[in-house]
Image (cartoon, rainbow, N blue to C red):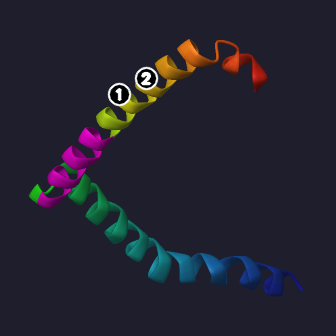
Amino acid sequence: MEEGMIAIIVMPLVVFTIFVAPIWLILHYRSKKQVNQGLSAEEYAALSTLADKAEKMSERIETLEAILDSEAPEWRNRA
């Protein structure tokens, strides 16, 4: 009975140690290496484009809020 209980505990540990842990470590350090390399030129260009679009959207929102403030001063209280 005790040998069966020990086998139930030991077998998953052996499988984890032999198969799962090495794969886990390899994938972990591979992702760390990719993070340390920084952004690629394509990723930097996409990020720059998104930042420009966000800036333009912010300006549009400010303009729309200014228009709404002048035409309907109580619009903020409706929500």
Q: Quadrant of residue 60?
A: top left
Does 21 appear in magenta? no
Circle 1: residue type = Glu
Q: Residues within 10 Å of mark 2 (few under 14, many from 20)?
A: few
Q: Where 14 sits versus 79, above or below?
A: below
Q: Quadrant of residue 51?
A: top left
What mark, if any, has residue 62 been given in the picture?
Answer: 2
Q: For mark 1, what is the residue?
A: 59
Q: Quadrant of residue 16?
A: bottom right
Can residue 38 be seen in this snapshot?
Answer: no
Residue sitting at the far front: 71
Mark 1–mark 2 distance (CA, rounded to whole Å): 5 Å
| Closer-to-camera residue (62/34) | 62
- In the image, taking residue 43 as reference, residue 57 lies left or right, namely right
Q: Main secondary structure of the magenta part?
A: helix
Q: Where 58 sits versus 19, above or below?
A: above
- In the image, taking residue 54 as reference, residue 66 lies left or right, namely right
Residue at left 20%, top 49%? 36
Q: Which residues are magenta?
A: 42-53
Q: Residues within 10 Å of mark 1 (few under 14, many from 20)?
A: few
Q: Where 30 sits versus 20, above or below?
A: above
- Check the picture and name the quadrant holding the N terminus: bottom right
Residue at left 68%, top 19%? 76
